[in-house]
């Protein structure tokens, strides 16, 4: 009897439906479509969340989807259906926000707008790629609209990776950061283009936003020297010293100032965050090969940073922009990041890079001319002194533009501080006078 009863219990157990058998063959196409569409929705939503860290949102969503699928297999269908519906609502909301930003870009302001519309990054829709020695360098043959502080302009690089016409030979080469690149203005309004229009000399614009003098030197060695220019203009910006430390760190700067950088093997390496990532790196793989180029990417992060900095004093609008007495009186030591064991190191690296540019100019028979923004006064004086020590020319173009701005002329972009089209033309006019006939 016990055996018969036991056999009956075994048969009943074998006939009991398994938890994962609560779907029929006809359900398979539906569930497959649900899972596939959920993955697509996750991709869209994670792309909207972040250009660089969106893979974390995608991974978290994939884990949640997996748990919902397990619940579905155990007969709790509502979990998967509910997750899919919430995912659809979130994605539709993100897509609507993306369309709103593209249709009415003026809806965002301040730092949030800068994050949403900027192209100053190395992700898929950014203007940069990463180089082990120079860090961010502009992508060749790349075009997009750019935005910063309320100003829109067109960015376009030629096959050699610099703004403007691609040249096989140039009469003049311009090195510098965003002031030379032409941040906020069209390519024909930037300093090199205005110099070419005024002088008739073919000019190559090798300027790049945020580039310190070490990076400018390497750019000249890689791209500028083979253009065999007659004159090389180099612009110094007050942030160059800070940018040198940020990109290279103290150890690489110490190594840099200890010897020449003409040979590729002696060139400094940027900090790891500015070096190319291996193909398997999750941030690089997501940013360059998976994420969609969405303008809403990063807005959440920008809003969060704004909330954290709520107690900080907001920048006062400056329209027209004019350098303040405090900015003009800033000392050279105040331009260096705090906490350095050797506060003089950034200027020594800057000065050494200028010397290396001078050596390269002598090798190709080019004249070197230095100029700056005209403020702070201490930095401008230091650049002029460096020009004398190097046997290079110096132009007070930046100083003349500051004086004109103080007289009320619109030399700078509103709320920004970069040269306006009028300011860039005034700089170019002053530089023409520094070129011998």
Image (cartoon, rainbow, N blue to C red):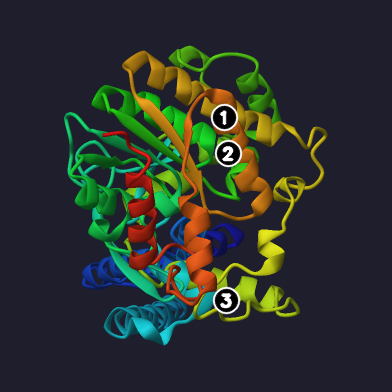
Q: Find residue 416 and name its label.
A: none
Q: Residues within 10 Å of mark 1 (few under 14, many from 20)?
A: few
Work out whether residue 6 can be spotted. Answer: yes
Element class at badge 3: helix
In the picture, the quarter occupied by the N terminus is: bottom right
Q: Which of marks 1 and 3 is in front?
A: 1
Q: Earlier in the sequence, mark 1 or mark 3?
A: 3
In the picture, the quarter occupied by the C terminus is: top left
Q: Tell me, yes or no, whether the two marked residues, 2 and 1, touch with CB atoms within 8 Å.
A: yes
Residue that mark 3 sits on: 303
Where, by quadrant of the figure, is residue 248 drawn?
A: top right
Q: Residue at x 39, y 63 (%)?
A: 423
Indicate the position of residue 435 as horizontal and vertical percent values: 33, 37
Q: Tell me, yes or no, whether the two marked residues, 3 and 2, touch with CB atoms within 8 Å.
A: no
Residue nearest the viewer, comparing 422 with 117: 422
Residue that mark 2 sits on: 384
Residue 383 drawn above or below residue 103:
above
Q: What is the CA distance from the residue labelled 2 to the residue labelled 1?
A: 7 Å
Asked if residue 196 lies left or right of residue 327, the reply is left
Asked if residue 164 lies left or right of residue 79, the reply is left
Residue that mark 1 sits on: 388
Indicate the position of residue 300 as horizontal and vertical percent values: 53, 73
Residue 368 drawn above or below residue 186:
above
Element class at badge 1: helix
Q: Residue at x 44, y 74 (%)?
A: 409
**Tally of numbered discs:** 3
Indicate the position of residue 242 as horizontal and vertical percent values: 64, 45
Q: What is the CA distance from the residue labelled 3 to the residue labelled 2?
A: 42 Å
Q: Residue at x 66, y 60 (%)?
A: 328
Residue 166 drawn above or below residue 269:
below
Indicate the position of residue 276 as horizontal and vertical percent values: 45, 35
């Amino acid at each position: 009897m016990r055996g018969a009863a036991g056999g009956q219990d075994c048969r009943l157990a074998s006939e009991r439906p398994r938890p994962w058998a609560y779907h029929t063959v006809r359900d398979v196409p539906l569930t497959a479509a649900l899972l596939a569409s959920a993955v697509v929705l996750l991709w869209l939503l994670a792309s909207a969340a972040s250009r660089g860290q969106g893979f974390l949102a995608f991974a978290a969503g994939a884990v949640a989807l997996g748990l919902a699928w397990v619940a579905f297999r155990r007969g709790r269908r509502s979990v998967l259906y509910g997750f899919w519906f919430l995912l659809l609502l979130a994605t539709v909301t993100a897509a609507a926000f993306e369309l709103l930003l593209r249709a009415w870009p003026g809806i965002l302001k301040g730092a949030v707008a800068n994050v949403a519309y900027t192209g100053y990054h190395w992700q898929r829709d950014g203007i940069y790629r990463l180089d082990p020695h120079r860090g961010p360098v502009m992508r060749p043959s790349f075009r997009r609209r750019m935005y910063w502080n309320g100003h829109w302009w067109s960015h376009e690089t030629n096959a050699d990776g610099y703004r403007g016409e691609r040249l096989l030979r140039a009469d003049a080469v311009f090195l510098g950061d965003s002031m030379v690149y032409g941040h906020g203005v069209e390519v024909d309004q930037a300093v090199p283009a205005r110099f070419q229009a005024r002088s008739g000399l073919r000019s190559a614009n090798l300027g790049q936003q945020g580039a310190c003098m070490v990076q400018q030197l390497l750019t000249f060695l890689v791209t500028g020297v083979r253009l065999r220019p007659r004159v090389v203009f180099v612009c110094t910006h007050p942030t160059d010293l800070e940018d040198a430390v940020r990109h290279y760190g103290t150890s690489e700067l110490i190594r840099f100032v200890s010897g020449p950088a003409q040979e590729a093997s002696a060139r400094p390496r940027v900090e790891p965050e500015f070096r190319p990532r291996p193909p398997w790196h999750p941030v690089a793989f997501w940013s360059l090969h998976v994420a969609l180029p969405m303008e809403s990417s990063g807005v959440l992060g920008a809003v969060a940073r704004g909330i954290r900095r709520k107690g900080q004093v907001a920048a006062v609008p400056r329209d027209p922009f004019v350098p303040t007495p405090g900015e003009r009186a800033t000392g050279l030591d105040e331009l260096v990041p705090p906490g350095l064991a050797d506060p003089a190191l950034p200027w020594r690296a800057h000065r050494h890079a200028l010397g290396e540019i001078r050596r390269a100019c002598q090798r190709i028979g080019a004249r070197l001319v230095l100029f700056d923004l005209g403020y702070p006064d201490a930095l401008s004086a230091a650049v002029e002194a460096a020009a004398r020590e190097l046997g290079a020319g110096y132009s007070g173009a930046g100083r003349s533009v500051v004086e004109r701005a103080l007289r009320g002329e619109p030399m700078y972009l509103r709320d920004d501080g970069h040269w306006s089209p009028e300011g860039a033309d005034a700089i170019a006019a002053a530089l023409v006078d520094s070129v011998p006939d």
